Image: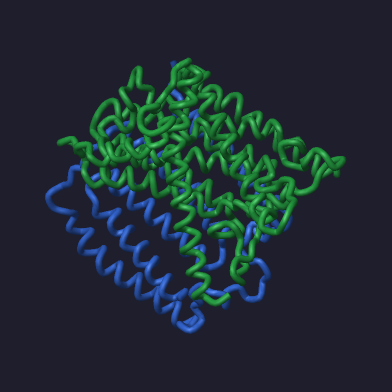
Chain colours: A blue, B green
Amino acid sequence: MHLALFIIFGAVCIGAAINLLVQKHPINSALSLIVVMGSLALLYLLLGAEFVAAVQVIVYAGAVMVLFVFVIMLLNAGEEERTPHGSRVATMLGVPGLIVGLGVGIWVVVRYAGLDRIAIGGPEILNGTEGFGNPHAVAQLLFRDYLLPFEVTSVLILVAIMGAVVLARREE
Amino acid sequence: MTIGTYILVSVIKIVIAMFVLLTAVAYTTLAERKVVAHIQNRWGPSRVGPFGIWQPLADGLKFIFKEDITPPFAYRPLYLLAPILSLTVALSAIAVIPIGPWVTVGGVHTPLQIADVNIGLLIILGLTSIGVYGIALAGWSSNSKYSMLGALRATAQMVSYEIALGLSLVGVLIYAGSFSLRDIVTAQSGTFLGVIPKWNIFTGQFIAFFIYLMAAYAETNRIPFDLAEAETELVAGYHTEYSSMKFAMFFMAEYANMFTVACLATVLFFGGWLGPVFGPPILQALLPVLWFVVKVLAFIFIYIWVRGTLPRFRYDQLMAFGWKFLLPLAIANILVTALIVALK
């Protein structure tokens, strides 16, 4: 059951990601990205991380992507214009590069982890940690064990937001 | 419970929930017209059956027989997707709402809730944030200036008020210590001095409740925050170009969302199905559901009452109210609640 769901949503995720690149209209690409986010949330759910799955939907699919769609609507962005022929250098170097990169990645995983040790969802991945991935466990990690890094990161993000506001603001 | 009975019980619950919800949605439209009419010193629908009780049926038939127009310059796939998305998301939210305690029917022990999940509240928040797309895409794909302006307004408004809405719920979560709606209700059981129930509204979440109510009105695009469909300036806002059943789907989604908001207010602040339970076993099983329904209907009435009473906000007022008043107030509420719980 877990394996079937993993394969289905994994396929949906990759299909939507490819669709995101292929689509010419920005709004279709944005919607594909939402599908990617949604299927990622379902994959998290299969791994037993309910809280992360819900936050993925609320924050990424719900808030971030709404702003993407909002901006596309506001600017009324039309179909993108494409140059008639792609870069020849990119085709010549990119395709072999992609194949080599994928090959190295697969080799490393198979060599050092072994295919049998790649757990796909289900209870076996929980490794006996009680309530792994539920809100309580996440809270224990964030607000007890890693409180300082967590707070420092949030201050960093705050600084970044203020920087963005300052940069985006035009002088009168 | 075997997997077979589990699926059977779930399907039965889903069918009943959908039937009840859709009927309630249909009759809320009648109730709204009746109540607003009486507020305005009119009679409202009174021709179709006694007191107009068949009016929702007549309206439904009318919607089905209306011509279904797709504007020639609309972007068809998204134009079709938008109402489906709105309605699906609005109806799904009912799945995690508990309407009563566990019951045993015919040897099957089951909660009065379609899915008892431990992140119930987060699922509802997630669904509301997905619901924004229905409106945004409807406005964009219609290729009409009124739809577009309505959708832009609705999107900005819903994204802004979602934050105040989410933060207003944190106080309740701190009290209950769980995202599960069932746990949140059971955490509110008991009374002070045997009279006042320990509902969250009476245990210090009073301000949170009002933040929630105002943010929820804005989320569901209802008066006084219905700028997305302000008919005096935008014709009908995001669904201007929709006709027939497609328009009806937006309409149903709006009313289903009202029910979700009312159910959530009941569960989070008014003790859900909790209330005095007495009498023979059959009555004891039915009374909690009755209390739940009464509380939800009271909220629906307040919705209609507000609609009949208040004028519409201006858009800048709406944004200033959300960001400069509700948001700081919600954060202050979290701080005070956390302090109280920590010092206890």
Left or right: residue A10 versus residue A26 is: right
In this picture, residue A12 sits left or right of residue B113: left
Q: Residue at x 46, y 62 (%)?
A: A42
Q: Could you tell me how many numbered marks the image carries?
A: 0
- Provide residue B202's location: percent of width, then percent of height: 75, 36
In the rendered image, the residue lying farthest to the left is A84
The residue lying at 55 percent from left, 60 percent from top is B115
Quadrant of residue B211 within the rendered picture: top right
> Is residue A55 among the parts visible in the rendering?
yes
**Residue B36 or A170: which is nearer the viewer?**
B36
Is B26 or A126 nearer to us in this picture?
B26
Tell me: residue B67, above or below residue B44: below
Front-lying residue, B256 or A4? B256
Is A106 on the left or on the right of A157, as rendered? left
Residue placed at 51% from the left, 41% from the top?
A: B259
Q: Quadrant of residue A145?
A: bottom right
Instruction: Tell me the quarter of the picture where residue B138 sits.
Output: top left
Seen from the viewer's position, the closer of residues A155 and B8 is B8
Residue B316 in sight:
no
The image shows residue B311 at horizontal and vertical percentages of 49, 17
**Residue drawn where x is 61% and y is 61% of the image:** B111
Does residue B183 sit above or below B52 in this rendering?
below
**Image quadrant for the N terminus of chain A?**
bottom left
Residue B245 is situated, as x and y percent measured from the top left of the image, at 28, 41
User: x%, y% of residue A81?
Assistant: 18, 43
In the rendered image, the quadrant that contains the C terminus of chain A is: top left
Does A135 sit above or below residue B250?
below
| Vertical relation: A19 (above or below) A151 | below
